[in-house]
Amino acid sequence: MTRIRTRVSPGRIAAWALLVVALFATVFPFYWMVRTALTPAADLYTDSTGLVPDHPTMINFLRVLGLTSQEEAVAAGGSGAQVDFLRYLLNSVVYSGLIAVLQTLFCAMAGYAFARLRFPGRDLVFGVLIAALMVPPIFTVLPNFVLVKDLGWLNTFVGMVAPSVLMTPFAVFFLRQFFLSVPREVEEAAILDGVGPWGIFWRVVMPMTRGPLLTVGLTTTVWAWKDYLWPLLSGRDEETRVLTVALGIFQQQSPNTQPDWTGLMAGSALSVLPVLVLLILLGRRLVESLNFTGMK
């Protein structure tokens, strides 16, 4: 019986080693965040070398969720600062949900127009839009803030989502690649049946590209969920404050000389759970869509 030997090249070993390092660098900060959240505040510095805390506790999660009294929170080593976690969580869901749904819809309309419709200057406009990818987002923060302030939209969800609700160059490019792959025969058959351009887009093309649309919606949700600077500038009031801004204010409100790290890590761990669940449920479809775009 002939044994087949598989040679492992040095390049393959180096690639696997690089992947292991990248995986460790990605996962370890999240693990350490959860580990710190499970550590009693009194043991934060004395029990900081092991991979697992000596006295794990859920008290930090309970006080972040408001399930303990202020006296119990202080007795557990907290700073006494309060955060209305559920309210800010709902604000984050509204903020990221509005941006994800509306931006995906408008980017799909723009991507389909660049892929199928013929109008003067189409390629030039598309080139200018793609060139906007090279503009750092920080450059648009100040003009957007002045505009939203002049419109009287500060501390409203309208003002918070307005700068991001229309479209982004990458999402338009991403969806255009998929619309180009839709067979023209399908659209021509719809035209023969008397379907207009809007009907073709809404009833034919959109259902055929649910995967890419879901991918854009997911990536947009993740981006909006972790956004901090713009919500901090445009929505500082209690009614519009999102979770990332609330956690920053929670850290600043600590009356001690040092922040409430265990409470802050518990809040941060809870804040990433919704997005983590979305990535677990839809991650495979996201990877498949990105691979398909790379072949175009």
Image: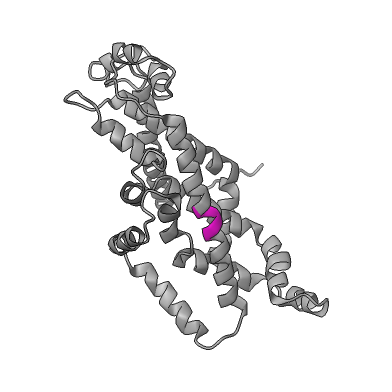
Check the image and report above or below for 142 versus 198.
Answer: above
Q: Residue shown at 21%/24% (left/top)? A: 255
Q: Residue shown at 65%/62% (left/top)? A: 209
Counting labels gives: 0
Q: Is residue 102 magenta?
A: yes
Residue at the extreme left of the image, as rendered: 257
Q: Is residue 49 left or right of 241 when viewed as pictured?
A: left
The x, y position of residue 60, in whole percent, is 37, 20
Q: Main secondary structure of the magenta part?
A: helix
Q: Is residue 128 magenta?
A: no
Q: Is residue 40 left or right of 11 when viewed as pictured?
A: left
Provide the residue span drawn in magenta: 99-103
The x, y position of residue 68, in whole percent, is 40, 15
Q: Nearer the viewer, residue 43 or 197?
A: 197
Q: Residue shown at 65%/58% (left/top)? A: 210
The x, y position of residue 207, in whole percent, is 70, 61
| Among the 4 quarters of the image, the one containing residue 44 | top left
Q: Nearer the viewer, residue 26 or 245?
A: 245
Give the quarter of the figure containing the C terminus: bottom right
